[in-house]
Image (spheres, rainbow, N blue to C red):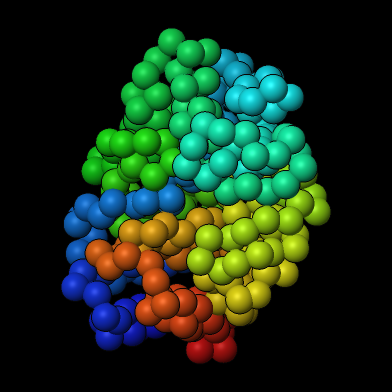
Amino acid sequence: MQTLDRIGQWPVDNASAAVVDGSRGVAHFGDRQRVYPLASVTKLLCAYATLVAVEEGAVELDQPAGPPGATVRHLLAHASGLAFGEHRVQAEPGAKRIYSSAGYEVLADFVEAETGIPFAEYVSEGVFAPLGMATAALVGPAGHGAQASVDDLSRFAAELLRPTLVSPQTHAEATTVQFPGLAGLLPGYGAQRPNDWGLGFEIKSGKSPHWTGTGNSPATYGHFGQSGTFLWVDPALDAACVVLTDRAFGDWAKPLWTDLGDAVVADLSGRG
């Protein structure tokens, strides 16, 4: 896929990328084994590990967790009311979409307590090992502390396209809007009404501007990270795109990420 070659013109020192097509395989750009910090793309991996815990019966989505009145579902969907970076309640559970890295720390502690397994170990054994993600590791907080290569995130993207670690029903629920209608801030892109989210996965819906392509379907889901990373899956294309860079997210990224998304969409839909 020559579309990815345009990344070579980006103002970054290093970048690696992949497009995972559910029916045609994987196209790559850059060093496939270079390990990058993932920042908030970490949340996808930790959310998926939590879903594995749900599948195993170790926790339940509607089990109380976090602030009074909140559940595992609230924490996964940024609807617990916890502040962004503090274990401080800012709203009643289910009242507002408050993007919360602190909420993922609370979630990780809860899963660890319920399973009796250190959370980083649980993510490794429940997600990384079965998918063959050899370079992936949770080396910091559950909200932003993972690292991985593009090859390994491609394996995770392939799992999202063809789930093997969770049931189709759990995967469908995770990528469906939870607590519909909640407004909130999408980091880097301002207020969104609504700010739709699934169980760990941000859902594009009608958000504009957005970090995915303008041509990506409303059902597109994924996450981006402040370290200059993103992963999106577009069910309408049966494809995913992973990009890792070593430059922090900022105004430089917004037009380039969207342009790349549109080029990938055009290429996969035969319009490129």
Instruction: Note whether 64 is above or below 100 in the view shown.
Output: above
**Residue 150 image-quadrant placement:** bottom left
Of all residues, the one furthest to the top in this rendering is: 116
The mark tally for this picture is 0
Whether residue 163 appears in this view of the structure is no
Instruction: Note whether 145 is above or below 11 in the view shown.
Output: above
Which residue is nearer to you in this view: 168 or 76?
A: 76
Q: Position of residue 50 (x, y in %)?
A: 53, 30
Which residue is nearer to you in this view: 128 or 81?
A: 81
Instruction: Note whether 112 is above or below 18 in the view shown.
Output: above
- In this picture, residue 95 sits left or right of residue 65: right
Q: Considering the image in quadrants, where does the N terminus appear?
A: bottom left
Q: Position of residue 63 (x, y in %)?
A: 69, 20
- In this picture, residue 100 sits left or right of residue 226: right
Instruction: Note whether 222 is above or below 264 in the view shown.
Output: above
Which residue is nearer to you in this view: 101 or 172?
A: 101
Q: Position of residue 118 (x, y in %)?
A: 37, 19
Which residue is nearer to you in this view: 231 or 93?
A: 93
Of all residues, the one furthest to the right in this rendering is: 181
Q: Residue at x 43, y 10 (%)?
A: 116
Whether residue 150 appears in this view of the structure is yes
Q: Residue at x 60, y 37 (%)?
A: 82
- In this picture, residue 138 sits left or right of residue 220: left
Q: Residue at x 50, y 56 (%)?
A: 223
Q: Position of residue 121 (x, y in %)?
A: 34, 24
Q: Residue at x 58, y 48 (%)?
A: 99
